[in-house]
Image (cartoon, coloured by chain):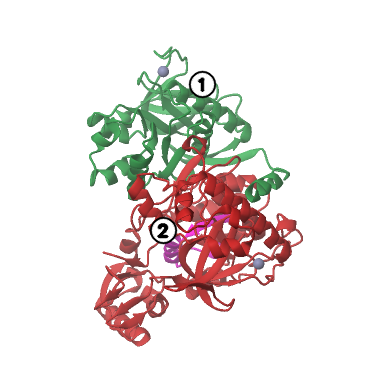
Amino acid sequence: MVGDRDTADRYFEPQVETMPRQELRARQEKQLLELVEYAYANSAFYRELWDEHGAHPRDIQSIEDFRARIPFITKDMIRAYRSRTGDPFAGLLCVPVEELTSVSSSSGTTGDPEFFAEIWQDAPPLVTAQVRDLWELGLRPGDRVLSPPGTFRNFMDAGFQALGAVVIEVDTWMGNMPEVVEALRTYRPAYLQMMYPQMVELEHLAEKTDLREAFSSLKGASCAGQPLSRKMRERIRDDWGIDVYEYTSAADTGTAWECREHDGFHLWEDTVFAECVEVDEHGWHDVPESDVGELVATDLDNRAAPLIRYRSEDLVRLSRDTCGCGRTHARMWVAGRSGDETVVQGRSVVLRDVWQAVEDQPETVAGVFQIVRDRREVDELRLRVGYDPHLTGDVDALAGRLSEAVRERTGVKPVLDMRTEEDLLKTMTSVAKFPRVVKT
Amino acid sequence: MARADTLARARTLDRPELAYLLRFPTADGMRDLELTWAELARDTEWVTARLREHGLAAGQRALLTASGFEGFWGHAVIGALRALKVPYGIAEAMGWDHRRTAVFHRELTPHAVIGLSAETLGGLAGAADIGEMFRSTPLVLARPAAVPLLRGVGVTAFVISAVGPALALECPERSGAHVNAAEWRFGERDGQLTVAAGEGRTSPLPETPLGITGRVVVGRCGCGSDNPRVLLAEAN
Ligand SMILES: [Zn+2]
Ligand SMILES: [Zn+2]
């Protein structure tokens, strides 16, 4: 049964995970003050920027000082520094390159990828910060896991193995789902990491394969890179019997996972200082806890190249209330990306509405679609939509229905480019991301 | 330090000896084999010595391209790079990720590119001159299918390849890829390679035909090693 397992030792590091907020805040304050000193002394990027803003570490004695004086940084500022100086690490690096263990990068689906400098011992940083999440999911020593689809942010294996899990080497990338199902039956793993396209592929197998039986050994599976639609999530949970854990990026400082309560993504606040703000031409302010704002993140556990007050462009709601799981670390709910909204002849169109219309057609229920636009404000809403050829008799008839459904939801009649799901998913250039908004 | 504390706690767990269950294609389908931490440590040591022979040393950088299911040899290569104090960048070996390989290559100027695939080269070929790109890279360790493509454009490429459960690595002599005789026994039958586990391996593996066309060369190599070499048809 989904979610049915021993809950006695739920926390991997109980003291940290359930730390009272006051203590957590004191800990963050200490970490922030050290970080500011460290970054100013060692990073050319921060020293230059903070000098320009008259922000000096000696004036920063509290979280309030930090927030009042340290300026935000953006992806564009990092890119600009990089192209001006030719430094691939954009002046963020606080140690000589020789001291790094590895360098991973963002997916680079929109422009050059950004580098993430890593220093580590037993396991790379991204997966190490997932160990608590995997423990919560139920992973325990001796359990088996299938190897993940890619090496996107370094091999993940060492993180699983740190928990005593044994990695089964199976190619879990797109196109291999029949083998994955066979491996599930043979090796009975406890955990599997999936990405959105694998889910779509499995959906196609569901007709002729007993997926519920195949997945029955899983304590849980994770899915990242794309929020699952409500329908897809129900399918995975109710029909396939998988307790699915979504996770998302914690503004490039790590990841944020759902716990077993499945009520928001937990940030690990001993690794990240999170702010939820609204920025406009006059400055910025905190948004109330029930409102959506932009996630601004500061790395608290990264000596290589920390991000400090980094504007993620992720629109989230943030709550610091204790979760049903007992953890005190904040949770966030992702509402979208700033810039995802498309303005068609003055009318605002949001992804969610398009998504709903696409999912409501049986042939496109997997929700594989993209908005094609070269800028935010456009004259027509161009949609590329993937359909399941096995369920589609008449593509034109589907397009007619879909067009009407999109118009009803958004008020805009779209220009449709119908492809098979497979064709559309094949255009992916990352294991991490199926882009919803593309330029061409 | 948060992550360090997490890992310290993890070290107190009662963890198994087993690190991987690796799977590899044979002439008769997929087969699996257990891989322990002790074996991984020996594999890492062996790869470290091979990369050192190629002159890899502190102060240099490397680029590794690999897939998620290649951790069993990726672990040994990464362990070797760490031992040699060579930071590495990492990208997928799949063709569609060629852009990241190109950016890492341009920005990190790696001394060594390890695990280059024919798929990556195929992706790169659209936008770059492969020869120009890699001729200036001192050490290119490429997968068998990529080797002829690289040598065809004047790149001195060396072979790196998983051969069944073992890793084969060409030495600077470039006369076949060495396999570790202390761990594996390689043979040939009807022009195809076979492998069996050596005595020290935890998981027994009787002589198994791999369905890989190639030859085994025994006897001392020009590099001084007595480890046998496999000559893979695909790489020539
Ligand atoms: Zn929770
Ligand atoms: Zn040799």
Judging by the rendered image, the residue that carries numbered circle 2 is A75
Q: Could one spot residue A146 in this view of the protein?
A: no
Q: Quadrant of ligand 2?
A: top left
Label 2: chain letter: A
- Callouts 1 and 2 on one subunit: no
**Residue A204 is inside the magenta segment:** yes
Label annotation for residue B181? 1
Q: Nearer the viewer, mark 1 or mark 2?
A: 2
The colour one sees for chain B in the rendered image is green
Residue depicted at x 40% and y 57%? A77
How far across and how far down the image is residue B70, in percent? 47, 41
State the residue in front, A425 or A24.
Answer: A24
Q: Secondary structure at mark 1?
A: loop
Q: Secondary structure at mark 2?
A: helix
Amino acid type indicated by mark 2: Lys
From this view, report whether residue B34 is shown above or below residue A276.
above
State the residue in front, A194 or A211.
Answer: A194
Q: Badge 1: how crowded within 10 Å, few (<14), some, or many (20+)?
A: some
The C terminus of chain A lies in which quarter of the figure? bottom left
Chain in red on the image: A
How far across and how far down the image is residue B19, in percent? 60, 40
> Are the residues flagged by discs 1 and 2 in contact, CB closer than 8 Å?
no
Label 1: chain letter: B
Residue depicted at x 59% and y 47%? A159
In the orientation shown, which residue stands out farthest toward the right?
A8
Amino acid type indicated by mark 1: Ala
Question: Gap in Å between the C-alphas at discs 1 and 2?
Answer: 50 Å
How far across and how far down the image is residue A240, in percent? 54, 67
State the residue in front, B101 or A294.
Answer: A294
**From which residue to which does the magenta span run?**
A189-213
